Structure formats: structure tokens, C-alpha cells
């Protein structure tokens, strides 16, 4: 029986890597968002840094999602 | 032969669905086909090497990979957002879940819908309705998609209860992590032609997410029952498929009709039994047990 361990390892590594990266980036985005909301409630105005962080992170996640859809739909290849 | 295989797969899937256990329809399909081919064409008709390489190894590996990925992701997500306000965090992840859950569906479709289409096309080719190298026609693609959607809509909530409440109590960050892990694992392995089970990948992801949140309790009893159901799925469906195939082979048209009638009878019995204790949108999150009040129709899958 021939087993393609390289392919299996590749799948495992890519899956774990992409998942952890995407979730961490999203969590950072949520953190930025929470900071913006906290600042708004404290009446100290907005939190520009938090807002920028949230925007960047959510854009990053959107890019990953777009790449995933690109991989699924064969017409894009 | 394909008919016998399908009977094996369908009956086994319905039975586990009644018990609220997410079993793999892919493995039931493989099991049913393997059993039917074994009886119909003999042992040499089954490529066991191929089966082990493409089914067994991914079956063991994929839930573990999804679980590890979800575990790490959940742990980090909680770690990062620990100091932020819980209300904002929950809302953020809940919105994110809309995107991640939507992504699970196409990933699920790339995997499972293809198998359904493959089997239907195979039937059409063997019946002579299609040429030998024909691809699946549009109506097959459309009906396979529609059938999967309808089945999820009608019966999915029994499984939702087991997955969302039975294994562990899922909060929105965990759900997000589990869905992200499931999607990437399915897509990555679909790329390399591993026929893995989306059911098992999602279960692995949810277990991992449960372990990643501190103090979250994982109900190992439910997880164990699911694992047993997975182990039994392939051989049980193979057995039903094999028995059906031998009846069809020796009984001719009469045998086919008998098997079809028995299958319909068992299927309606299972649906009727599920009616006694329905799980619907308003009570799906109430309990963590999916109960069947009537005596469990034990061995119904193998007796058919």
C-alpha cells in the first residue's frame, strides 16, 4: 500500500496554518472594534488606532475568503 | 449493484440521523458500494489499496487536523480578546460567523454534492442512459444540490443539537474557529483528491474548539458514541449493501422489488419514529440529548 505522506502532511500544515492565521487576524480585528466601542462609550471620542486596526484586519480576512472562493469556483482558473 | 449500494447507504444514514448522531454519508455511500460490489463482482472487484489510501487514512487524519487547528485558533482567539469587553467581542464574532458558516457550505458542496452526482451519473451510465465518458448532466447537478439543501433544512436540526450542544457548549468565537478550521481542511484536501467526510471534519473542529476554551466541558460520552458510529458506518453500510446485492442477484426483478419495498418500509418507520420527538427551531438549543422515546429499532440497519 502506497501512502502519500507528503500530500497528507501538506494538507495538515496548510490547514492548521491558514486557520490559525485567519482566526488570529479576525480576533485582532474584533479587539480593535471593541476598543472603538469602548472609547465611544467613555465619551472620549473615537479611537483612530483601534479603527485602523479593525479595518485592516477585516480586510485581511475578506482577502482570505475571496481567495477561498477563487479556489472553489473552477471558472476563475 | 449500485442500487443495492445506495440502499445500504440510505438506511444507515437515516438510522443514525434518528439517533441524532452525525454519521458520514460519504462513508455510508462507500460502504454500501463496496459491499454491493463485493457480492456482485467478487472480492477482486474492490480496490482495497485504493480504498485505504483515499478513505481510511483521510478519515482518521482529517478530524484530528481540524481539531488541532480549531483548538489552537480558539485558544488564541480567547487569549487575544481576553481584555476587551465581552459584549463587543461576542457581537464581532457573531457577525464573523455569518461569513465563516457561509463558507462551510460551498466547501461542503464541493465535497459531498460531487459524490451524489458521481453516483447518479454512474447509475445513468450503467443503465445505458448516458455515454461511457459523459459528465453529469445539468439536471443531475441541480437535483443533487437541491436534495442536499432540502435534507439539511428538513432534518438538520437533530444534528445541530448534537453538534452545537451535545459535544460542548459552543460560543460564537469557538464557532468561528471551528468553521474556519473545517473550511480550510475540506478545501485543502479536496484539492488533493482525498475523499474525506465533512461530517467528521466539522465534528473534529467542534471538539477542538471545545478544548480550546478553558473550562469548557467536552462531553466525551457523546464524542465516543459518534466515534463508534463512524467506525461502524462503513462495515454496516457494506453489509446492508452486500445483502441487498445478493438478493437482487439471485432474485432478479422480484428481488429488486422486495429490496425496494423493504427499504421504503424501514425508511418510513424511521421517519415516523422521529416524529414522536421532533427537534425544531424553537427547541433546538434546549437540551443536549437527542432522545428517541420509542424503543430503539436496534439492528434495523443490518436486519434489512
Image (cartoon, rainbow, N blue to C red):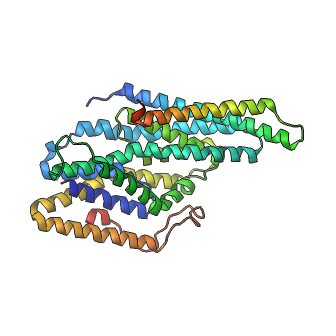
Horizontal arrangement in the rendering, residue A12 relative to residue B287 (left or right) = left
Q: Nearer the viewer, residue B265 or B56?
A: B265
* Residue occupying the point 33% across, 67% down: B267
Q: Can residue B207 be seen in this view?
A: no
* Residue occupying the point 30% across, 63% down: B301
Q: In this view, does B301 lie above or below B170?
A: below
Quadrant into which the C terminus of chain A falls: top left
Q: Can residue A61 be seen in this view?
A: yes
Q: Which of B43 and A38 is in front in this view?
A: A38
Horizontal arrangement in the rendering, residue B112 relative to residue A19 (left or right) = left
Which percent across, then down, holds residue B28? Answer: 32, 52
Q: Which of A6 and B153 is in front in this view?
A: B153
Q: In this view, does B269 lie above or below B200?
A: below
Horizontal arrangement in the rendering, residue B180 relative to residue B55 (left or right) = right
Residue A27, by quadrant, is top right
Most distant residue in the top direction: A6
* Residue occupying the point 71% across, 43% down: B89
Which percent across, then down, holds residue B110? Answer: 40, 42
- So how many labels did they put on this image? 0
Quadrant into which the N terminus of chain A falls: top left
Which percent across, then down, holds residue B69? Answer: 53, 36
Residue B146, by quadrant, is bottom left
Which percent across, then down, holds residue B219? Answer: 55, 53
* Residue occupying the point 64% across, 49% down: B171
Amino acid at each position: 500500500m502506497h501512502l502519500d505522506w507528503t500530500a497528507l502532511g501538506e494538507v495538515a500544515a496548510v490547514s492548521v496554518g491558514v486557520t490559525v492565521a485567519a482566526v488570529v487576524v479576525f480576533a485582532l480585528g474584533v479587539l480593535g472594534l471593541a476598543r472603538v466601542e469602548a472609547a465611544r462609550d467613555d465619551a472620549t471620542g473615537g479611537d483612530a488606532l483601534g479603527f485602523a486596526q479593525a479595518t485592516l484586519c477585516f480586510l485581511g480576512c475578506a482577502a482570505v475568503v475571496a481567495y477561498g472562493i477563487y479556489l472553489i469556483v473552477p471558472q476563475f482558473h | 449493484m449500485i442500487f443495492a449500494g445506495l440502499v445500504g447507504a440510505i438506511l444507515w444514514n437515516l438510522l443514525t440521523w434518528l439517533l441524532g448522531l452525525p454519521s458520514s454519508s460519504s462513508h455510508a455511500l462507500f460502504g454500501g458500494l463496496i459491499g454491493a460490489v463485493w457480492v456482485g463482482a467478487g472480492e477482486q472487484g474492490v480496490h482495497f489499496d485504493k480504498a485505504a489510501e483515499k478513505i481510511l487514512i483521510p478519515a482518521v487524519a482529517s478530524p484530528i487536523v481540524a481539531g488541532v487547528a480549531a483548538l489552537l485558533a480558539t485558544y488564541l482567539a480567547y487569549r487575544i480578546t481576553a481584555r476587551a469587553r465581552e459584549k463587543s467581542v461576542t457581537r464581532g464574532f457573531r457577525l464573523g460567523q455569518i461569513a465563516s458558516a457561509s463558507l462551510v457550505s460551498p466547501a461542503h458542496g464541493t465535497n459531498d454534492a460531487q459524490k451524489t452526482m458521481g453516483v447518479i451519473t454512474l447509475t445513468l451510465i450503467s443503465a445505458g442512459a448516458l455515454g461511457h465518458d459523459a459528465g453529469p448532466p445539468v439536471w443531475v447537478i441541480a437535483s443533487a444540490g437541491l436534495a442536499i439543501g432540502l435534507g439539511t433544512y428538513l432534518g438538520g436540526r437533530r444534528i445541530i443539537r448534537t453538534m452545537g450542544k451535545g459535544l460542548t457548549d459552543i460560543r460564537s468565537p469557538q464557532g468561528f474557529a471551528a468553521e474556519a478550521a473545517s473550511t480550510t481542511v475540506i478545501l485543502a484536501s479536496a484539492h488533493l483528491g482525498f475523499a474525506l467526510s465533512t461530517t467528521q471534519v466539522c465534528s473534529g473542529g467542534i471538539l477542538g474548539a471545545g478544548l480550546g476554551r478553558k473550562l469548557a466541558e467536552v462531553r466525551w460520552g457523546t464524542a465516543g458514541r459518534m466515534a463508534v458510529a463512524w467506525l461502524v458506518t462503513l462495515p454496516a453500510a457494506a453489509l446492508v449493501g452486500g445483502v441487498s446485492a445478493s438478493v437482487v442477484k439471485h432474485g432478479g426483478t422480484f428481488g429488486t422489488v422486495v429490496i425496494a419495498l423493504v427499504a421504503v418500509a424501514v425508511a418510513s418507520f424511521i421517519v415516523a419514529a422521529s416524529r414522536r420527538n421532533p427537534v425544531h427551531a424553537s427547541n433546538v438549543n434546549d437540551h443536549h440529548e437527542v432522545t428517541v422515546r420509542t424503543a430503539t429499532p436496534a439492528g434495523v440497519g443490518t436486519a434489512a
